[in-house]
Amino acid sequence: MPLEEAGRAKLALIVEYDGSRYAGSQVQSGKPTVQGELESALRKVTGEPIRIKAASRTDSGAHARGQVVSFETGSKLAPETFVKALNYYLPEDISVRAAARVDMSFDARRSAISREYEYTILNSVTRSPLRRRYAYQVARPLDVAEMGRACEALVGEQDFAAFTGASEKSLRGTVRVVRRAGVRREGESVVFGIVANAFLPQQIRRMVGALIRVGSREMTVEDFMAAVRSGERGALGPTAPALGLCLVRVDYGPEMSWFRGNTNEDI
């Protein structure tokens, strides 16, 4: 496939951001968003009114280490120049980590094979001022082994309607493919990690809310598994806050190995 077409090229960026002060990644009228900041910086660099496409929509207050966005441009600037120029104009809580020219057919969202997220819980009776924007504090003890057993029910292709809101009737399809899900303890932190082809709105945050109930013995693993299999909308939750959620990486397969690192080499 062509890297350029009729004088235009397509680029992809790996973007990291602290989402604390943004109303999500997707542009919204009158509200600060990651997309809005990126498009503003791109216009200053290229002089063009550019619209970007992101691999995954992150919630208000959620973060990213490996968000991927793509866009078309008539600019002839090299990828490494885009990195430097965009970071000059972007606010301190957003950074372009890498850039590359990609095929014109590439779409950051549709070309993605999977997305990987992590959710961090601070499992401590005392708060942490330094981590207050990046981890959800749960004071009661959590049984990580039981939470891990519950995660086994999440793996595979299945209907995840149980992790939708009871009022979300407009969602047409609730089947997703989860390739990996698990929980690990790192000192005072309990980290839930999950990889899937795609996610429903607030699906991960509802999973975390339910897993916290399992870990604190408010729900048995068997009840959790039964609720997952029920397909009943709103069966599981509550919804954990967005601040502990982070998009770690997006996978595009072996032919696009550039996205596994932070280099500025073309794909």
Image: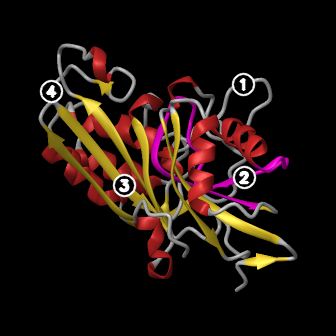
Task: Tell me the amino acid under the disc marked 2.
Answer: Ile
Tell me if mark 4 has few (under 14), some (14-19) or many (20+) residues whose alpha carbon lies within 10 angstroms of its own: few
Tag 2, which secondary structure?
loop
Mark with earlier residue (2, 3)? 2
Q: Nearer the viewer, mark 1 or mark 2?
A: 2
According to the picture, the residue beneath numbered tag 4 turns out to be 141
Label of residue 52 in the image: 2
Q: In this figure, which residue is indicated by the disc labeled 1?
A: 31
User: Can residue 100 be seen?
Assistant: yes
- Spatial CA span between label 1 and label 2: 17 Å
Distance from disc 4 to disc 2, alpha carbons, whole Å, reads 43 Å
Start and end of the magenta stretch?
46-72
Q: Secondary structure at mark 1?
A: loop
Q: Are marks 1 and 4 in contact (CB under 8 Å)?
A: no
Say if mark 1 contacts mark 2, CB within 8 Å.
no
Which residue is found at the position 23% from the left and 48% from the top?
183
Instruction: Tell me the quadrant of the picture where the C terminus can be found.
Output: bottom right
Which is more foreground, mark 3 or mark 4?
A: 3
Q: Residues within 10 Å of mark 1 (few under 14, many from 20)?
A: few
User: Residue, x 25% and y 38% (percent of image)?
Assistant: 214
- Mark 3 = which residue? 194
Distance Cα–Cα, label 3 vs label 4:
22 Å
- 51 is within the stretch colored magenta: yes
Amino acid at dot 3 = Ile
- Which x, y percent locates residue 226? 35, 52
Give whichever of discs 3 and 4 has the lower sequence position: 4
